[in-house]
Image (cartoon, helix red, strand yellow):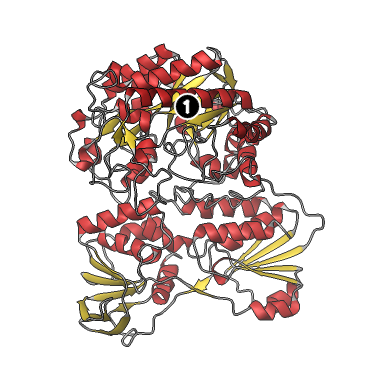
Amino acid sequence: MSINSKYEKLLEPGYIGSVQTRNRMIKSGAGMLMWHQDDLHMRPEVLAFYEGIARGGVGLLIVESPTVDYPRGVRWKERYRIDDDKYIPGLVELVEIIHKHGCPTFMQMNHDGPWEVKLPFVPEPMYDGPPIGASPVSFTEGAADFHKEPPHPLTAGEIQEIVDKFAAAAVRAQKAGFDGVDINAASSHLLHNFFSPFFNRREDEYGGSVENRARFAVEVIQAIKKRTGQDFPLSITINNFELGRVIGVDDSKCLTHEDSRKIARLLEQAGADAIQVRSHILGYHVGAYLPDTLFYPEPPFPPESFPEQYDSSDKGVGANIPGAAGIKSAVSIPVITVGKLDADLGEKAIREGKIDFIAMTRRLLADPDYPRKIAEGRLDDIQPCTGCDNCLGSRRCRINGLLGTPYNTIEKAKKKRKVLVIGGGPAGMSAARVSALRGHDVTLYEKSNMLGGLLPIASIVKGPRPEDLSLIIHYFSRQLAKLGVRVELGKEADMAVVDAIEPDVVFLAAGGTSTIPKIPGIDGPNVVNGAALHQKLKFALKFFKPETLRKLTKLYMPLGKKVIVIGGAIQGCELAEFLTKRGREVTVVETGEIMGDGMVDAMMDYLFNWFHKKGVKLISGVKEYVEITGKGLTIIDRDGNKQVLEADTIATALPLTPNNELLEKLKAVVPEVYAIGDCNEPLLIADAIGTGLRTAREI
């Protein structure tokens, strides 16, 4: 692999204990939940996932935690296990495929004991008993958190049982061939539960002073080192602070940065070879470990009020670097940090001596070859992570359609074919790119004057944070040009075009059309329907970039003060957020029982809590839309009552209807025709890109 001098420090080998890393980029142990608790061997999709990352050049690959204490230590059944020797052969399979590409690998270990609670957005707990923790402390405030039931306080004997389980798991990892282990004592897992003075109210040797609160983790490290040997590397992940203000608890009663510095020194003295640094916010679990999501739709407290150990200046990007620097100044072992990092931030922070390594997962899900492309200077070829967080427990990625499949490569086709792609949205661009990679002769027709389909319009609503949809358009535009795809913009591919090209294969990616509900008055002057809105915005996009139009909407929009949004799926919810931020009083109505269909669960929870604070009304289970008048929308609610919802403007934001009118005509004259994306089934961007890729991979 050639070396890009721009990233000299980032691409240098490093050491964690006795293990040399290939560079300073680490795949963190974030969970993908790709197993089942009954598995004894690696599933093909698991091997494909980890092999792709190992082959892509990452410096060190940390495999997500198998279960060390079943069932009380695991929250999801989609984890592998390591609480018995019978699970070692399966892990051998995994280690071998990682080592095949010259990549060192650690196995992470964590304990979900405090999380064994019943919550609406995750499955039932695996453990029938109560959650376990340092003390019987819980809270009900905050969004999407795991601490709504008081845990059973562990006895000293029970703590020793768990210490032994960690050590036994580390021995099994060593036998399986792992080069080291990583202990997750961050987030609000069991070991952090003991670090935290908020959670830990004990009066025995495991509570009170910093030394006592760190004792559990210290004993875990010492037990592992005793049983695996001092030369078997061990890293540990901790929070550099914990904030309680979201749930009404004074931050001083939580884990402070100074506490974490002291704990870091104790962990080093116990034998830790490296420390990875994150942060935690009570009541904002996901926002704590994915710092960019903390700012969606707005941060729970003013950015300027964050501790100095947290950089809030760029909405979560590189937020944990100052805290990691504070930990580094307290220890002599390498320090790693994580949280919306990239090569530029990593190089800068390493050069400045603030950290020694960067850890990431989402960027490597989007492009497993990220480190290799960085080293080779192929920055334009990097598949961008847009921060959509579709990967949270879903085993898929918006931009990388191979994630979650048994495949991690795109091979050349045995025979070159003439391919026509009709439509330049996400599905069409994806199919065109992969077809070209496979060596086919590819032409793409897009009737508008730009690529992206509805992505430019969606980016007006979404904005650049936390999701930047423009990255998708720019990436595919560059790749299609580089791969020699003929792109015909402003031209509609009718049957005459098809007859002239005589393709062997056609991908119909014509997208969807706006769904207009059949409601008396839907054509009224106070109604803005999706079709008309899309047409107007597409016209405006001929003259302005999406970000410019987004800024202009803060100055003027042709909408009244009170707005009703018809449609409570992801389209309607995101429109409601957009309008609320522009001073509108919004009501969202939905015929289904559930709002937010298509949204990532944690993000939906954050958004709905924000809606509650902002006074946005959500009305689901509507039995009938009766009529639209100058006063607003009349509905029959879930209880059969007629209501008049007053509004100045009614806007429709419903899932699209497939636009497949060419499909049968194409099938009559073309040997192979594939309808992909919204023209087949209107779903999400990830579905469109994924189906385009996976379909094109097979032709």
In percent of the image, x 26 and y 75: which residue is there?
Answer: 649
Of 376 and 400, which appears nearest the observer? 400
> Which residue is at a point 49% across and 46% down the rendered structure image?
77
Q: Residue at the location (45% across, 14% down)? A: 271
Q: Is residue 631 left or right of residue 113?
A: left
* Residue 177 visible to the viewer: no
Residue at x 41% of width, y 79% of height: 516
> Looking at the image, which is closer to me, 358 or 173?
173
In percent of width and height, residue 364 lies at: 54, 40
Q: Amino acid at mark 1?
A: Lys
Occupied quadrant, residue 61? top right
In the image, taking residue 213 as reference, residue 57 lies left or right, namely right
Q: Position of residue 682 (x, y in %)?
A: 51, 68
Visible residue check, residue 505: yes
Quick one: which residue is furthest to the right in this view?
A: 415
Estimate the x, y position of residue 110 in percent, counting from the top left: 44, 32
Tell me the residue that label 1 is attached to. 165
Q: Is residue 275 above or below residue 87?
A: above
Front residue of 645/177: it is 177
Residue that protrudes farthest toward the bottom in the picture: 520
Specify the quadrant that holds the C terminus: bottom right
Q: Residues within 10 Å of mark 1 (few under 14, many from 20)?
A: many
User: Of helix, strand and loop, which one carries label 1?
Assistant: helix
Give the position of the N terminus as an image quadrant: top right
**Residue 414 in picture, x, y percent from top left:** 82, 55
Quadrant in the picture for residue 50: top right
* Total count of labels: 1
* 244 versus 650 height, above or below: above
